[in-house]
Amino acid sequence: MPDNKVLIIDYGSQVTQLIARRVREAGVYSEVLPSWTTAQEIKSRDPGAIILSGGPASVTDPGAPGLNPTVLELGVPILGICYGLQLLTHHLGGRLARSEDREYGPTQLEITAPSPLWKDLPRFARVWMSHGDKVDMPPPGFTVTATTPNLAVAALACEARRLYGVQFHPEVHHTKIGPGLIRNFLNLAGLKADWNMTSFVKHTLVNLKTKIGNGQVICGLSGGIDSTVTAILLHQAIGKQLHCLFVDNGLLRQGETDEVRKLADHFRLDFTVAAAAKLFLNRLKEVVDPEQKRKIIGRTFIEVFEAEAAQFGQVDFLAQGTLYPDVIESVSPQGPAAVIKSHHNVGGLPDDMNLTLIEPLRDLFKDEVRAVAAELDLPENFIWRQPFPGPGLAIRVIGAVDDERLTILRQADVIVQQELKETGLYRHIWQGFAVLLPLKTVGVMGDGRTYENIVAIRAVESVDAMTADWARLPYDFLATLSRRIINEVQGVNRVVYDISSKPPSTIEWE
């Protein structure tokens, strides 16, 4: 990886990877490391700068993640964000205190002292806070550079040592001066803006060749942009050592298998279909708990892969299109973040799996993957294909999954996709789909009583899937969806629209 880089130490914030994202958007390569990474390991990576993330703990609590003081002596600029600011304060002789009122949400920042961190930024700005502790007294040698109506110390700096701290979160979208602040930090560190998707592809291909060597790889190709970009990167890196396997698990959208086959032929990928619908549906029979569904699907995927691998001889690696939102919601390999839900290809994988994982997109967000896809010259209509969950329709059929309920959902979802595309709304939302609820309601059709299923429509706007807002779709459009689904899908007599955002909800219902 590039020598020109920033290391981000993760103290458990759900948005730590947004810091890495903002750094990359500014053109500088970044890596996220867990809070327990040794000072020796950090030094060996030769960072040009270090950022300490936020986190849910209090610095002075027993067992709270800490910071090796040796890191502060590396001579590189350090920026502490929220918990990171409090770590700097604690280790360098300042004093912390509990905030009288915990502060969550927007507040007004006033810059009160000059600093390279504030170059070309306005004196007053709206920033995003999320903290329960505060700096009561700055460490010796530090100057307070910003305040808010509730905080006497909203930012501080020791220019002589190039140590900086901010109590707010510059990485989140709500802090409008955040990108400028991060660019200023990178500039004062003397880091060049030379990281882009061309660089990512170049370094990824080198890394894949090195890691795989002469090994054989199976790639789980689903037809979505994540797995397809993964497959094409591998194909460019190792050629005939790659074998793409499509698992027809019976949980796919209508016509999905044929579409994926055409896609694989277009890119001349070695492609095999594993017909496993009966196996998956048998194992999911009468299962209603979403976590159990995901884990069953994850384990069954691996079993199918390992069984199919036998036809290719000795296979060493399993490649997946895992993205960072999948990782941070499923497990926390890089820090003490909370688990939200298991993704079938992350939390659902068995411990005794015989294949080594290859996940070249693991640290990227969806829009970054789309940028990689453009770099690889994929068709534009494919690049902008909306996300589809790895567990498939199993997590959109709420409750028990069977052929009848899957058929109802497929037919409803086809209508949603058709109308989104025909009206031009498809490119303007992040994701739009149908969900089949485990409820029935009374209706009237043809002057007769019905007692049939409810379909929910979910449409959200997002940039990276870490947060999302429900899409304000036109009433006439929603009316068309409702009319078509009720008229054309046998077994449905009611359509509802989901107006929940993430957080507190998730994008998928399960």
Image (cartoon, rainbow, N blue to C red):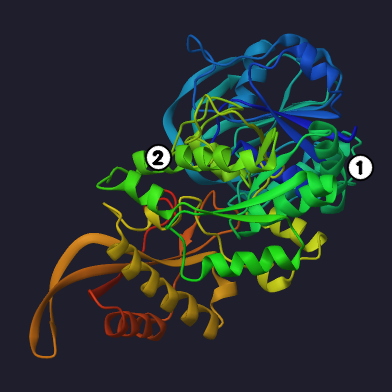
Q: From where the camera sits, is residue 423 visible? A: no
Disc 2 from disc 1: Cα separation: 46 Å
Contact, CB < 8 Å: mark 2 with mark 1?
A: no
Q: Which residue is mark 2?
A: 296
Front residue (pair 212, 423): 212
Q: Which residue is found at the position 64% from the left and 43% from the top?
A: 311
Residue 395 lies, in percent from the top left, at 38, 53
Q: Front-most of 201 and 175? A: 201
What residue is rendered at 87% in x and 33% in y?
A: 189
Question: Of helix, strand and loop, which one carries label 2?
Answer: helix
In front: label 2 or label 1:
2
Residue toward you, 272 or 386: 272
Residue drawn at x 52%, y 12% as measured from the top left? 60
Please determine whether, in this image, residue 375 is positioned above or below residue 208: below
Q: Which mark is residue 192?
A: 1
Q: Which mark is residue 54?
A: none
Q: Is residue 211 left or right of residue 139?
A: right
| Identity, as a three-letter code, of the amino acid under mark 2 | Ile
